Amino acid sequence: MLSLDQLTNPMRVAMVGASDDPTRIGGRPLSYMLQPEFAGVCFPVNPNRDQVQNVDAYPNISAIPGDIDYAIIAVPAKQVPDAVAEAAKKGAKVALVFSSGFAEMGGEGIDLQQKLLAVARQHGIRVVGPNCLGLFNSKAHFYATFTSSIDRALPRPGGVAIASQSGAYGSHIYMSCHQRGLGLGQWITTGNELDVEVAEVISLLAADPDVHTILAYVESVKEGPKMIAALEAARANRIPVVVTKVGTSDIGAAAAASHTASLAGEDKIYDAIFRQYGAFRVSSTEEMIDVAVAARPRIYPVGNNVGLVTISGGAGILMADAAKDAGLDVGPMPQDAQDEMKEVLSFAAPRNPVDVTAQFFNDLSLIPRFTRTMLDRGGYDGLVGFWTSVAGSPILGPRLLAYLKETMAAYPERLFLHVMLASAEMREAYESAGFPTFHDPSKAVQALAAMVWFGKSFAQSKEKASTIMSSKRAISRKFDEQDAKQLLASAGIPMVADATASSADAVREAMAAFDGPVAMKILSQDILHKSDVGGVMLHISGPDEAAKAYDQIIDNVRRHRPDLNVQSVLISPMAGPGVDMILGGKMDPIFGPIVMVGLGGIHAELFQDVAFRHAPIDADEATAMIDQLKARALLDGMRGEEACDIKQLADAIVAMGQFVAANTDGLLSVEVNPIRVSARGCVGLDALIEVKEIGDE
C-alpha cells in the first residue's frame, strides 16, 4: 500500500538521466535536492559523467552505495522499463517517470507503456507517470519536478494540496494559488496514470492532517470505485475537494484523449458522482482559487441564510442578486432589529443587505455594532462585507480589521468574507486573521455558496444506502415489455397492470377486464421503439375498436418489420393525468451502477432534464435528485393542478437504484418511460430492459 511519505518524502533518491545543466529536465530536480533544506540524499545517475552539478555521479542505479527508496527517471522511453526494474531491485518503492513517448503517442507507445506496467507489477514498485511533470512536498523541500514555476516562486508551506492529471495545468493552478497567497504543501501530477491515479492521490492527501483543501484537475477516471472511495474519505475528514473536470464537449473530450491517452467519460455521470460524494466542481481556475481562499478558515456553514453588509447600496444589490443566483437566501433582518439599527443611524438601510452608508468613514464602530446585530438577531449563517478600497487604506484598513477581529471572536463558527481592493500585505493581514478577501463582490458570494455546499455535504450521514436486494435477478436473457414490467414490479417499482392477447378475438375477451380506455402496443423483445413501427395505439374503447386496433397494429408491424412474425399485443389501462417522468438506470463502464430520473415522455430527449446518482441510494438522495431537476416545479402543481406525490416517486427511484445495483453482471440499461406521477402516486406505463450479449464485458 502506497503511503504519502513514500510518494513525497523520500530520503535516498536516484536521479536517473541527471543533467549537469540545472535548467534541463534531468537537471532541475537535482539542483533542488542539492539545496541544504532537503534532508535526504540525491544520487545522480549518468553513464557519461563522473560528476553532475559538482556531485559524484554513478553509471547506473546498481552502482549507488546502499539501497535507495525513490527513483526519478528522465531517460528515453525505451530505457525506462529497465531503469524501473533496476530501481526496484535496489529497494526503491516509487519510480517517478518524466519520460514521454508512451501511450500518449499511440502505436508502439501503447505497447511500451504496457511493458512498463508489467515490469512495475513484477517488481512491486509504484510508478507515477509516465509523461509526468512530477511532484513536490514543500514542507520536506522535496521538489521532484522540472516545472519552471519553482524557479519563479518557491511555494509557501500550507494546507492546500493539488492533484492534477496534467502537469502544465497543475503548474498553472500552483502559480494561481501562490499569487493569491495560499500556502501549498503537496503538489502531485500523474501524467499518463500507468499506475498511480489522481483518485489514489486524493485518498492519500485526505488522510494527511496537514491538508485542509484539495484542488484536483481531472481528465478521466479509469477506476470509478477508487475515485468514489477517495471522495468519501475526504468528506469523512471534512476536507473540501474542488474539481476541474475537462472533456465536457466533443472537442474537449478528444483533446483529453490525445493528451494523456485516456478517454473522457460521460460528463453527466462525472457531475453526478462529484455531487453525490462531496466534490465541488468548478468551471474555471479562478473559481477554483476563490473556493480555496474561502476554505482557508475551515468554516463550513450548514445553512444558506446570508447577511450582506456594505458601504454601497449598489454593491448590496449586486451581491443580493448574486446570492439569489447561487441559491443563497438573503433573508431580511427582523423589523425590531431594523428599528434599533435605524436609531443608531437614521439614514441606514438595515433590511439586508445592510447599508451603513458613507457614515462608515466617520464612525468605524458602526461595523461591529451592525455586525453583531446581524449575527445575533438575523441568525445569518455567513456574512459578506463590501469595503472596496477603504479596507486597503493604511489608516482605516488596520482599524477596520481590529474591529472585525474583536467582533468575530464571539462568533468563531460564522464565516465572514470581505470584498476589498488592497495591497497583498493588507489582504494577507485580513486572511491570517480568518477573513478571506476578494476583489469582486459576486465572486465572494459565490465562494460563500461553495462553503455552504461543503457544510451541507459534510453534515450528511456518512452511511451510504446498502439495502441491495438479497438475490440476483435473472437478466441473462432478453425481455419483452410485459416481462420487464413484471420484473420491475417485483423489485418494488409501481407498474401499470396489463394483459396480453394474440388475436382479435382474444383482444375482445381481454377488454372485459378494463373499465375505461386502453393503450395497445406490440409485444416483442426485438422491437425496442414501438411507435417507430406503428406498434402503438392509444385511447381505445370497447371490444370492437380494440379488435380493429389489433389488426392495424399487426399490419403496421408486418410492413415495417417483415422479418418478424409477431402476433401478441399488450393491453394496458390509460393512466390518469399527471406529470410524465423517466426513471432508469445503466451500467457505466467507469463507475458501475447508475440510477436516473428526469422529465420523461416525449420530452425526455428534447430537454434532457435528468439527474444521475451512483446506485444504490437512500430516500434523501432520491429527493435531492428530484429537487435538482429544472422541471421540479411541475411536480408541485401549476395553475391549480394538485401537487404530485414526491415521496412515492422518491421511493421508486430508491427501488430502481437497488435493482440496478443488484444486477451489475447482466444489465446494460433499464428504463421506465414514462412513469406518470400525480397526487395519487406514480405508476410506470412502459418498460425496457437491455441486457449484455454473451461475451460482452
Image: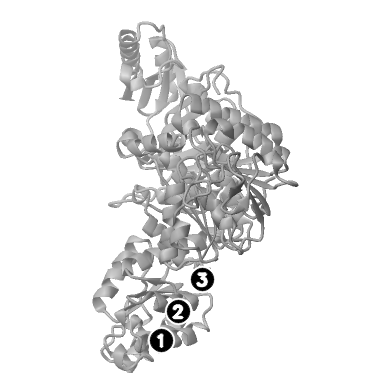
Which residue does the numbered mark 1 point to in the structure image? 398
Question: What amino acid is at disc 3?
Answer: Pro
Depth check, front residue: 116 or 559: 116
Q: Which residue is mark 2?
A: 429
The circle drawn on residue 297 is: 3
Task: Write the residue at 63% across / 32% down.
Answer: 82
Q: Secondary structure at mark 3?
A: loop
Residue 291 lies, in percent from the top left, at 43, 62
What residue appears at the point 37 percent right and 67 percent down from the top-left corner? 445
User: Which corner quadrant holds the C terminus?
Assistant: top right
Q: Residue type at mark 1?
A: Pro
In this view, the residue in front, 12 or 129, is 12
Which badge, 2 or 1, is on the more N-terminal residue?
1
**Viewer-proximal residue among 399 and 111:** 111
Compute the Cα span from label 3 to label 2.
13 Å
Circle nearer the viewer, 3 or 2:
2
Cα–Cα gap, marks 1 and 3: 20 Å
Identify the element where label 1 is drawn. Answer: helix
Closer to the chain start, of discs 3 and 2, is: 3
Q: Position of residue 79 (x, y in %)?
A: 58, 32
Within 10 Å of the Cα at label 3, are there few (<14), some (14-19), or many (20+) other Cα atoms? many
Of mark 1 and mark 3, the one earlier in the sequence is: 3
Could you tell whether 71 is left or right of 427 in the image? right
Residue 379 visible here:
no
- At x 37%, y 63%, the residue is 446
Give the class, few, some or many, for how many residues have Cα within 10 Å of label 2's Cα (few <14, many ≥20): some
The amino acid on which the numbered mark 2 sits, given as a three-letter code, is Ala
Labels 1 & 3 near each other (Cβ < 8 A): no
| Mark 2 and mark 1 residues within 8 Å of each other at the beta carbon | yes
Residue 9 visible here = yes
Q: Residue furthest left?
A: 314
